[in-house]
Image (cartoon, coloured by chain):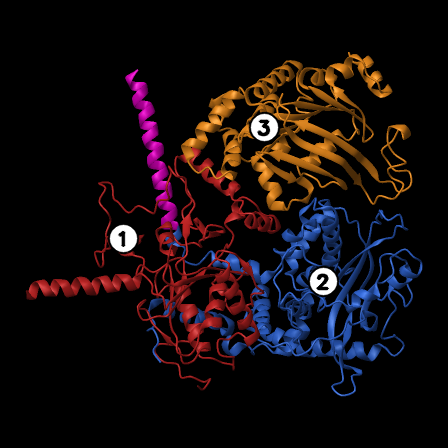
Chain colours: A red, B blue, C orange
């Protein structure tokens, strides 16, 4: 494939220098793959790696990006989302970079078509399959960072599965607020030992990690850690027997569940926003592909009804 | 090969890139594009800073980085660093001796005079920071005359290229411990290939600091100087110059000079230490070195080298002595990246936060209602 | 007092510094120092041996620098001894303390031992409420029912006479005596068979001291907990300890039943101490 690809309607970037397929040199990719294997072998353990600098800023998904670039091949189909949407600027930026440096791959917005999904802050609503890999972008890999700033001390706590200080924080939350107030980055125990920071996915998405069919990889570029939730693995959010883990609530004042104003879905995670023109509060599926699919389904069933 | 169609987000990014390019070139006909050599020479210290923070000695690309980033030092260092990331490692030099540096500036605060002499060199140390209004409308002719006149007036044949090290004199007298030659055989820690896992060896700390963001490392070193620390340094020697880079000849194996790098080196002597061993106490040494002409950075680095050694030995009593605190917060690429990322969409996590607060407010409200109801019922 | 041995300590030594071959022979009560004149190392404790039986309180008495605190710090794994052996017996099992790995030591510290320090900062987490401190201990023991944890914390605080209305406050708002009570509650959270008390009443007002000593004795009667109480106060020894060890400059100078030692001390130093008690 020539390195002077014509800029098409679907690409706004053109490669201006010759890069290795996947931008990273092969040694870097090897290190990432070895780290991934180790992470799968020790579920939930944060594997340190040297983490190359990428052309996008630390904090913009360089960890997730390095995972994707180390794993992607020309036959793969990639989906990139941010906040659940393929159109969000971060997703657009990353996707165009990967298209630019991995000529031959396919990219898609449909979860069902992708075998590699890189995501920031959401797990897709559509259940994933065994042949799919989900890569999550992580700012803080370590759930213990809220109770201990020294990485050295945290390593020992993880090694001994000593999460008492983290659990005490949950206890104090309940004492103060009668609720566990952690919103996203919910600490989750993997395979009965290591507690991970599940990344800034909402609590809504945490149950999807449990016994997932797909492999879930988590990459922190700035903090230089890779960890994994392998398929069919226990992923248990920390809770008390009598104060169970709860997902976000989308009920209105009357106790009615809010629905997406576009597709009518009332069982997905919703974005709440003020309409730019009318100023009215609106709810919309955060997962843009799911919303699209729901809309198609709704339209086809209503057509059926009108035809029936 | 199928790609996702571009919608709003992609157009916005493309538009942003074009806007930056417009800002860069909006002078239009009234200006010439920035020349890379001009940046390297007339913005000499800025250029040095980018060489140092980018961690790659490539003067031309450092100039390009400054040009394409419109002078943003964090972005320019980032561009150079990201470029370096894609380059394979071809070979490693043996340990280089900075005594062989072709010196352009060299001073010591420890002694009034030193073998070879105090060579002030190109320094702003004693300059008056007054606005030089004569430069407001500097003409081409005036500009060109300055260098010509200086070269004409100065005779530099009698200035030696290399100078002995002040520290060697201190070592001869036994005031500093002798150099441990066996250390030179150890491979230094490679921070570009291995992650930092604390405790880290001194070479890892030094290499991390060598490409640290200047302001960040200065601030932490300053905290030590001001009192959150105990180093009390004296500059034994600060030198700036061109260090020959030696590589073995591919056939004969003989070390050959393949080029030189501009660098700054600072060695500070700090308070002497009690040795449990009962052997002679000596001064302790702090070392700083980086690409380019960056004195503030080299001095800061040498102070932190000392304070980190103290911290690793006795446990940190100040932030500047804590290796985790210092080494994880001085990299400009990491810090600016994370700072900048806060501008990215975070509305899903915020949705989650709102959910928590609303639930908590409801519970608080319900409790409050109960107590007021209770009070009313009394 | 049963005849079950719970702890056996043999030849425990702790040297701070490089140490040399002459350290032990040049230090101790005979030489009036615990600093080795040859190498400058501090021989904080040497050749400490004793037994502790289930349900008894052993007092370790000595003035500053006697090595009494050092000894129990090593047994509680705050420090590692230079040499020596210690065996802990519980529920039919035997633990060679200084040969355990970090995980095993932590297990004993959390489940089988309790420690109350002179300075509450060492024993309490000041970033967490009084109830939270107790919860922390229970959570280490895999108790995951919030109400159960809360109930147990209330029970323990009541037992140690801390106002349960204050259980959600941070320890920094408490008086020294109350902080000690919270420490004791925390130490007892897991019903440990062995409790270490390191100068727990030193620095407190006399009436507060008396109350805490009373509490300790009640607990001992109720739960038959074996205890080692380190102190420099003869009054505390007299009240609490069944048997006593006297230490000076890192060595044991006398051991025996507390009554006997106080009535009829054999060692010259012990005699001086007993005579000088107010």
Residue A54 in sight here: no
Residue at mark 2: B203
CB under 8 Å between discs 3 and 1: no
Q: Position of residue A270 (x, y in %)?
A: 30, 53
Query: In which chain is the residue bearing label 1?
Result: A
Question: Closest to the observer: C94 or C200?
Answer: C94
Query: In which chain is the residue bearing label 3?
Result: C
Residue at mark 2 to residue at mark 3: CA–CA distance:
44 Å
Query: In which chain is the residue bearing label 2?
Result: B
Query: For residue A179, which numbered disc appears in the image?
Result: none
CB under 8 Å between discs 1 and 2: no
In the picture provided, is C72 more to the left or to the right than A307? right
Question: Closest to the observer: A7 or C150?
Answer: C150
Residue at mark 1: A283
Q: Residue at x 50, y 43 (%)?
A: A166
Q: Identify the image quadrant of residue C271.
A: top right
Q: Quadrant of the C terminus of chain B?
A: top left
Q: Is the residue at mark 3 from the same chain as the one at mark 1? A: no
In the picture provided, is A211 more to the left or to the right than B289? left
**Placement of B337 over or under B146, stated as above or below:** above
Q: Position of residue C110 (x, y in %)?
A: 57, 37
Q: Is residue B363 magenta?
A: yes
Q: Which residues are magenta?
A: B350-378
Residue at mark 3: C183
**Secondary structure of residue under mark 3:** helix
Label 1 Cα neighbours within 10 Å, binned few <14 / some 14-19 / many ≥20: many
Label 3 Cα neighbours within 10 Å, binned few <14 / some 14-19 / many ≥20: many
Numbered circles on residues, count:
3
């Amino acid at each position: 494939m020539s390195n002077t690809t014509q800029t098409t309607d679907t690409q706004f970037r053109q490669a201006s220098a010759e890069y290795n397929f996947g931008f990273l040199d092969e040694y870097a990719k090897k290190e990432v793959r070895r780290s991934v294997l180790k992470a799968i072998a020790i579920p939930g353990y944060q594997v340190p790696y040297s983490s190359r600098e990428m052309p996008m800023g630390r904090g913009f998904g360089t960890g997730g990006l390095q995972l994707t670039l180390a794993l992607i091949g020309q036959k793969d189909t990639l989906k990139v989302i941010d906040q659940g949407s393929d159109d969000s600027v971060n997703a657009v930026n990353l996707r165009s970079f990967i298209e630019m440096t991995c000529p031959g791959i396919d990219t898609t917005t449909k979860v069902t078509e992708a075998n590699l999904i890189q995501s920031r802050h959401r797990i897709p609503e559509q259940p994933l399959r065994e042949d799919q890999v989900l890569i999550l972008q992580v700012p803080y890999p370590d759930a213990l960072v809220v109770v201990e700033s020294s990485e050295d001390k945290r390593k020992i706590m993880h090694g001994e599965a000593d999460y008492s200080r983290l659990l005490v924080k949950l206890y104090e939350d309940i004492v103060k607020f009668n609720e566990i107030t952690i919103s996203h980055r919910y600490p989750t125990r993997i395979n009965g030992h290591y507690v991970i920071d599940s990344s800034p996915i909402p609590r809504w998405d945490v149950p999807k990690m449990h016994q997932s069919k797909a492999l879930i990889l988590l990459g922190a570029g700035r903090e230089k850690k890779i960890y994994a939730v392998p398929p069919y693995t226990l992923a248990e959010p920390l809770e008390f027997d009598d104060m169970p883990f709860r997902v976000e609530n989308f009920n209105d004042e009357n106790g009615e569940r809010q629905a997406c104003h576009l597709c009518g879905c009332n069982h997905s995670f919703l974005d709440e926003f003020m309409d730019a023109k009318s100023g009215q509060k609106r709810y919309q599926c955060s997962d843009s592909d799911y919303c699209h699919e729901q809309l198609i389904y709704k339209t086809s069933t209503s057509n059926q009804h009108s035809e029936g | 090969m199928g790609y996702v169609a571009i919608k709003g987000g992609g157009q916005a990014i493309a538009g942003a890139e074009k806007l930056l390019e417009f800002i860069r070139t909006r002078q239009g006909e009234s200006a010439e594009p920035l020349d890379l050599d001009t940046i390297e020479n007339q913005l000499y210290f800025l250029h040095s800073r980018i060489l140092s923070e980018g961690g790659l000695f490539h003067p031309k690309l450092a100039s390009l980085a400054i040009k394409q980033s419109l002078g943003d030092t964090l972005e320019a260092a980032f561009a150079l660093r990201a470029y370096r990331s894609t380059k394979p490692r071809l070979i490693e030099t043996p340990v280089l001796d900075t005594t062989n540096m072709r010196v352009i500036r060299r001073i010591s605060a420890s002694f009034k005079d030193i073998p070879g002499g105090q060579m002030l060199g190109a320094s702003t140390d004693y300059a008056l920071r007054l606005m030089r209004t004569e430069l407001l409308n500097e003409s081409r002719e005036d500009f060109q005359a300055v260098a010509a006149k200086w070269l004409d007036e100065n005779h530099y044949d009698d200035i030696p290229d290399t100078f002995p090290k002040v520290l060697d004199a201190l070592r001869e007298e036994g005031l500093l411990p002798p150099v441990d030659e066996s250390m030179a055989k150890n491979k230094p820690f490679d921070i570009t290939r291995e992650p930092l896992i604390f405790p880290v060896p001194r070479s890892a700390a030094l290499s991390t600091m060598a490409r640290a963001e200047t302001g960040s490392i200065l601030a932490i070193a300053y905290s030590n100087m001001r009192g959150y620390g105990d180093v009390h340094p004296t500059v034994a020697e600060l030198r700036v110059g061109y260090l020959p880079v030696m590589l073995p000849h591919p056939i004969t194996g003989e070390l050959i000079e393949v080029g030189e790098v501009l660098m700054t080196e600072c060695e500070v002597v700090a308070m002497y230490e009690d040795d449990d061993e009962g052997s002679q106490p000596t001064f302790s040494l702090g070392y700083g070195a980086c690409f380019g002409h960056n004195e503030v950075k080299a001095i800061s680095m040498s102070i932190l080298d000392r304070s980190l050694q103290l911290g690793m030995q006795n446990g940190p009593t100040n932030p500047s002595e804590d290796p985790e605190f210092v080494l994880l917060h001085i990299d400009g690429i990491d810090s600016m990246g994370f700072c900048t990322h806060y501008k990215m969409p975070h509305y899903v996590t915020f949705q989650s936060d709102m959910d928590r607060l609303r639930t908590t407010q409801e519970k608080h409200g319900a409790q409050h209602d109960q107590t007021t109801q209770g009070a009313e019922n009394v | 007092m049963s005849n079950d041995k719970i702890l056996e300590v043999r030849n425990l030594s702790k040297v701070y510094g490089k140490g040399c071959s002459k350290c032990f022979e040049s230090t101790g009560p005979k030489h009036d120092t615990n600093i080795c004149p040859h190498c400058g190392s501090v021989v904080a404790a040497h050749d400490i041996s004793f037994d502790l039986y289930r349900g008894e309180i052993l007092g370790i008495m000595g003035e500053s620098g006697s090595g009494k605190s050092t000894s129990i710090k090593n047994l509680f794994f705050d420090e590692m001894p230079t040499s020596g052996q210690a065996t802990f017996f519980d529920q039919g099992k035997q633990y060679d303390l200084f040969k355990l790995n970090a995980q095993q030591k932590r297990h004993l510290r959390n489940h089988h031992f309790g420690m109350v320090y002179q300075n509450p900062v060492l024993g309490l987490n000041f970033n967490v409420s009084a109830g939270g401190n107790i919860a922390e201990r229970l959570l280490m023991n895999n108790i995951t029912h919030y109400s159960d944890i809360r109930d147990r914390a209330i029970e323990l605080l009541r037992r140690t006479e801390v106002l349960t209305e204050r259980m959600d406050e941070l320890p920094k708002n408490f008086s020294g005596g109350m902080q000690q009570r919270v420490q004791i509650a925390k130490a007892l959270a897991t019903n440990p068979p062995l409790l270490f008390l390191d100068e727990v009443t030193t620095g407190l007002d006399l009436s507060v001291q008396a109350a805490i000593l009373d509490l300790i004795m009640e607990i001992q009667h109720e739960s038959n907990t074996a205890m080692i109480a380190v102190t420099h106060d003869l009054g505390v020894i007299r009240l609490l300890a069944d048997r006593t060890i006297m230490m000076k400059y890192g060595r044991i100078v006398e051991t025996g039943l507390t009554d006997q030692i106080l009535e009829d001390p054999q060692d010259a130093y012990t005699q001086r101490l007993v005579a000088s008690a107010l």
